[in-house]
Image (spheres, helix red, strand yellow):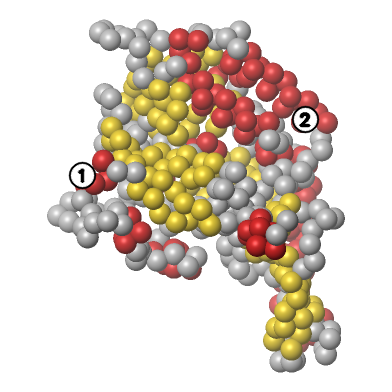
Amino acid sequence: MAEEDKKIDDSKQPIFLNLSADNPETVLTESLCGNCLKNGETRILLTKIPHYKEIVLMSFNCPHCGNENNEIQKSGIISDKGIRIKLTITTEKDLNRQVVKSDYTSIKIPKLDFEIPAQSQKGEQDQPRRREENPEIAIDIDLFLAKLRGLKVIDEPFDIIFEDISGEVYVENPNAPHPDRNCKISHFVRSQAQDNLLGIYSEYNNELLKPVDKDEFTYEDMQNEVLQFPTNCPECSCPCSTNMKVTKIPHFKEVVIMATNCDSCGHRTNEVKSGSGIEPEGVRIEILVKGKDDFGRDVLKSDTCSMEIPELDLEVGPAALGGRFTTVEGIIAATREQLSCGSAFGDSKDSEAVKRMDDFIAELDKVLNGEREVTIILDDPAGNSYIQSLADVGCDERLKIEKYTRNEEQNEELGLNDMKVENY
């Protein structure tokens, strides 16, 4: 192979590789030691944790004073919303759940009136000296630690709340793919200060969305053209492009469809967002899927919509499948694909859990093969989801649509409680 061809091939290699013994050597760089203010060495490794995401591993060592520090930092795209997970501990099994947290995760235990703020969870150095200098504080800490250890006995249920403005905290569901009755997940809109803390600012370069052959960009242009703007692949972080188009769904509304295709790793994503904001009421759509005719129905699932299949005891949160414009068959197949990739259990090797997942996927296969009837329920508090009716005139007996008034918690998740909508 010519040297020029080799360079082209190398440029298409993913930046983040799967974590394994075959990882390339780490990058070595000099860094200032915060302890002795002399130069130390930092080793950096860009890698991927299976079933999770890309991370940056950094290991610092100072040869002068012996100071060491190891850190893990997330890479990739920041979620649109923050996440709050409330876990109720009832048994020892709940204490053994796997947890993934970022530097922006705060942890609260209301029973002890205890909170660990985000970015404040690194162990303090030189604890023996601090205890000698502050004996009264040391006694209070020991008493609190005794209470903390007492929670492991689980005399009565208690809650642990994980809140992360970056949306990157995860708590294992040991009963997946079935609902987690002890875990309540909600999402919230970040404040401007929280966005700034993550390095997100409101200024946006609109030039990226303008057609290259026009000086001005209008709404009609957006309707008639497929716009393209540069981005990074969510899988391998290599540069790629996203196509965006505004389209009208018959008998519904306008939506924005975005599709990303990475030439480096082959990863493809598609996302749908409403083009008309949040509806005055939420919507609950129920469709009875009896066979191939129902598989072809168009489905618009927004990124605020949860999905439920009662016959399979399956609940899928809004973030799991994201926003999609697909068919009934497509959304069932997407659910199967996501479950079969093993992400529901992280790196767990629990044979019982794996068997339960295999049995569940087999049931989904029966649905896709038309061997089993199921009911799909879409619940969207923003009112931006839709399932196509097969009845040209009159009522579709298999399709039920119900509008409802959102509660306070749903308005909070959508960011409506703090939104000024009058005299603006």
x, y percent for residue 83: 52, 50
Q: Residues within 10 Å of mark 1 (few under 14, many from 20)?
A: few
Q: Amino acid at mark 1?
A: Glu
Relative side of 68 to 390, left or right:
right
Residue that sits furthest to the front in the current view: 2
- Displayed quadrant of residue 26: bottom right
Q: Residue at x 81, y 28 (%)?
A: 352
Q: Amino acid at mark 2?
A: Val
- The residue carrying mark 2 is 354
Q: Earlier in the sequence, mark 1 or mark 2?
A: 1
**Disc marking residue 206:** none
Dot 1 and dot 2 residues touching (CB under 8 Å): no
Q: Secondary structure at mark 2?
A: helix
- The residue carrying mark 1 is 220
Q: Residue at x 45, y 13 (%)?
A: 294
x, y percent for residue 114: 62, 61
Q: Residue at x 34, y 64 (%)?
A: 205
Against 20, residue 294 (above or below) is above
Of circles 1 and 2, the one toward us is 1
Q: Secondary structure at mark 1?
A: helix
x, y percent for residue 141: 73, 70
Q: CA distance from mark 1 to mark 2?
A: 51 Å
Relative side of 250 to 148, left or right:
left
Nearest the camera: 368 or 416?
Answer: 368
Against 72, residue 325 (above or below) is above
Q: Residue at x 31, y 9 (%)?
A: 391
Residue 32 seen anywhere in this rendered image of the structure: yes
x, y percent for residue 93: 77, 39
Q: Residues within 10 Å of mark 2 (few under 14, many from 20)?
A: some
Against 43, residue 273 (above or below) is above
